């Protein structure tokens, strides 16, 4: 996502633009907001459980957490689904990047997540 400041007819707007995945369509833009309006603080990231692992399991796309496939303490192999994200009416598995044990699950079913957000950690 990219942030831009645009002036239209003397009015200044902050806009956020998400780049499409080569669909040929113009990128979608959020509704313009006047710069003078107070901006909402970004949502706080969920706190990892104590002893969280060093291997991050990150969302590959923005969406909502649909299902948790693994539990803390569970052993997983590289490629095993840890969390399922729902985006654009598709279920997208987020998989373990390598073998390990789930140290923390940092999201709950129904949470909105951005691409690159840490969903879980492994040891």
Image (cartoon, helix red, strand yellow):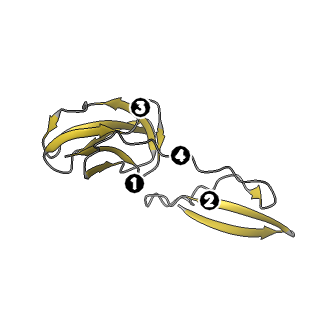
Looking at the image, tell me whether mark 3 or mark 1 is earlier in sequence order: 3
Kindly indicate whether the residue at mark 1 contacts the one at mark 2 (C-beta within 8 angstroms): no
In the image, what residue occupies the spot 22% across and 39% down?
102
Q: How much space separates mark 2 and mark 1, taking CA atoms?
A: 17 Å
Kindly indicate whether the residue at mark 1 contacts the one at mark 3 (C-beta within 8 angstroms): no
The residue under label 3 is 108
Question: What percent of the width, then of the height, locates residue 92?
Answer: 33, 40
Pick out the residue farthest to the front: 50
Position of residue 33 in the picture relative to residue 61 (left or right): right
Label 3 or label 4, whichever lies nearer to me, is 4
Label 4 or label 1, whichever lies nearer to me, is 4
Label 3 or label 1, whichever lies nearer to me, is 3
In the image, what residue occupies the spot 56% across and 46% down?
43
The residue under label 1 is 116
Question: Which one is in front, 105 or 30?
Answer: 105
Looking at the image, tell me whether mark 4 or mark 1 is earlier in sequence order: 4
Give the crowd class for mark 3: few <14, some 14-19, many >=20 residues within 10 Å.
some
The residue under label 2 is 16
Q: Quadrant of residue 27?
A: bottom right
Looking at the image, tell me whether mark 3 or mark 2 is earlier in sequence order: 2
Question: What percent of the width, then of the height, locates residue 90?
Answer: 38, 37
Looking at the image, tell me whether mark 3 or mark 4 is earlier in sequence order: 4
Q: How much space separates mark 3 and mark 1, taking CA atoms?
A: 16 Å
- Element type where label 1 sits in the image: loop
The residue under label 4 is 44
Kindly indicate whether the residue at mark 2 contacts the one at mark 3 (C-beta within 8 angstroms): no
Pick out the residue farthest to the right: 10
């Amino acid at each position: 996502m990219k942030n831009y400041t645009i002036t239209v007819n003397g009015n200044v707007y902050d806009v956020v633009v998400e780049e499409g995945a080569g669909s040929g369509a113009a990128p979608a833009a959020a509704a313009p907001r006047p710069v003078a309006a107070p901006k909402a603080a970004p949502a706080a990231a969920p706190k990892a459980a104590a002893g969280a692992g060093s291997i991050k399991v990150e969302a590959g796309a923005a969406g909502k957490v649909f299902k948790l496939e693994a539990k803390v303490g569970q052993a997983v192999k590289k490629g095993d689904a840890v969390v399922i994200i729902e985006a654009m009416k598709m279920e997208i598995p987020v998989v373990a990047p390598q073998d390990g044990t789930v140290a923390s699950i940092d999201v709950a079913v129904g949470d909105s997540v951005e691409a690159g957000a840490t969903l879980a950690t492994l040891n």
